[in-house]
Image: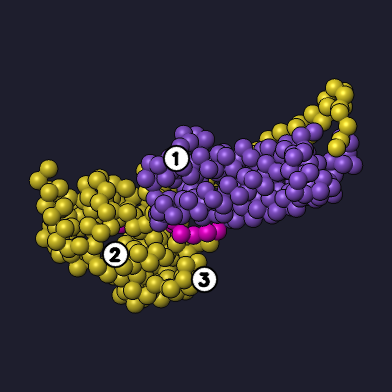
Amino acid sequence: MPPKRSPSRRRSTAWRWWVLIAAVVVAVVVGVLVQRSRSGTEQATVTRPASAVGPNGGTLVGQANAPVTITEYGDFQCPVCARLYELWSPTIDQLVQQGKIRFEFVALAYLDRGTTESARSAAASVCAADAGKFLEYENELYSKQSQAENSGYLTNDRLVAFGTDAGITDPSFAKCVRAGRYDGWVRTNTDAASQRGVTGTPTVFVNGRQISNGVAADSAQLMAVVDQASQR
Amino acid sequence: MRTPDTLTQRRLPARWWPWCSTVARVVLAGVWAWAGVTKLSDPDAGVRAVRAYEILPEALVKPFAWGLPFVELVLAALLLVGLATRPAAWASVVLLGVFMAGTVAAWSRGLQIDCGCFGGGGQASADGVRYLRDLGRDGLFLTLALLVAAGAPSRLALDNIAGT
């Protein structure tokens, strides 16, 4: 057993607390400075798309005066988003053609982990929207999605090739993708989604009210929700 | 010094306790180092993970998200070399307590979030089992931290050279 300490000896351990406090304060200050300089959101140069933009910064498909807006927050690396796309896109296409809805797709960079595949594919989809081929490009990205996230699959070359497959002939598309013209736009939308409380993808809103992915994926239920929303 | 006298006499010889503290210290240092490193890679994902708990006001989200991995690394370094060991261990107790409180707060409000404990976070998929697992793991680390904070002084620590 250690001997009983005199008060003067006990006081001498106080320096350890000062070491800890100093180290923590320095860590927080250094952390904020370093991480801010590395943050894609903080460093973003924002370019507004030439194509139609929805109320949440997403790509807008359909007539601007449609009574109902369906907003999907999605990530092109997200497997559940690909599944939802497969299940609901016939219904979405039909509702858009009937003029019942306008569809807003907010492409997010949620699944990147120090990588940029979600961010670059999202930005590329805005380039495709500028070329008038958003839905075709979305189809390419989801139907040819990689099994593994952040595996290096979504290279710029592949993102450009998807554009060709989607029927984009405008040479400025490849330039837009390679220059990352809409990277900053995507980062801004991603941050705004997070501030809105969107914690995962896909997240679907109908006229600003969130609906579950189960309802979204079921054609009859989705149509019922849209009918309800248009009467409100 | 509050050595657990009854425990040391009945179960473990007193001379073993300082070594238990050393082992606990090094394991905890490893945990903090891993937690810190995995949070570093994506500053934006860190911000989203903190925001997903819906606890901190927006003004504090970024300082917390960006300061946290560096604080974790500092704790790892202090515990590893045994400098300011007890304060670092008490700080670990407090931080783990904050994490567990955050997890309980998220769970009780029915939020579906990944804890972001070792990077990532935010993505919806959590259920009760997952929250329980996170709490159990944090509780284990908390026990280690308490052992270092309130137990016998560690062997192989810089504190021993630098004075009592």
Element type at marker 3? Answer: loop
Residue A4's place in the image compared with A53, above or below, is: above
Q: Which residue is mark 2?
A: A84
- How many labels were placed on the picture? 3
Residue A41 seen in the current view: no
Residue farthest along the top direction in this orientation: A7
Residue A67, image x, y percentages: 14, 49
Element type at marker 2? Answer: helix
Residue B127's place in the image compared with B148, above or below, is: below
Residue A101, image x, y percentages: 17, 55
Which mark is nearer the camera, 2 or 1? 1
Mark 3 is surrounded, within 10 Å at the Cα level, by few (under 14), some (14 to 19) or many (20 or more) other residues, namely: few
Mark 2 is surrounded, within 10 Å at the Cα level, by few (under 14), some (14 to 19) or many (20 or more) other residues, namely: some
Q: CA distance from mark 3 to mark 1?
A: 36 Å
- Which three-letter amino acid code belongs to the residue tagged 3? Gly
Looking at the rendered image, the quarter that the C terminus of chain B falls into is top right
Display colour for chain B = purple
Q: Chain of mark 1?
A: B
Residue A152: numbered disc:
3
Task: In the picture, one chain is yellow; tell me its letter.
Answer: A
Q: CA distance from mark 2 to mark 1?
A: 30 Å
Residue A81 seen in the current view: yes
The residue nearer to you, when weighing B104 against B1, is B1
- Which three-letter amino acid code belongs to the residue tagged 2? Leu
Residue B148, image x, y percentages: 73, 43
What residue do we see at 55% from left, 54% from top?
Answer: B119
Q: Which residue is mark 1?
A: B105
Provide the residue span drawn in magenta.
A104-114
Prevailing SS of the magenta stretch: loop
Residue farthest along the left direction in this orientation: A231
What residue do we see at 37% from left, 45% from top?
Answer: B110
- Which three-letter amino acid code belongs to the residue tagged 1? Ala
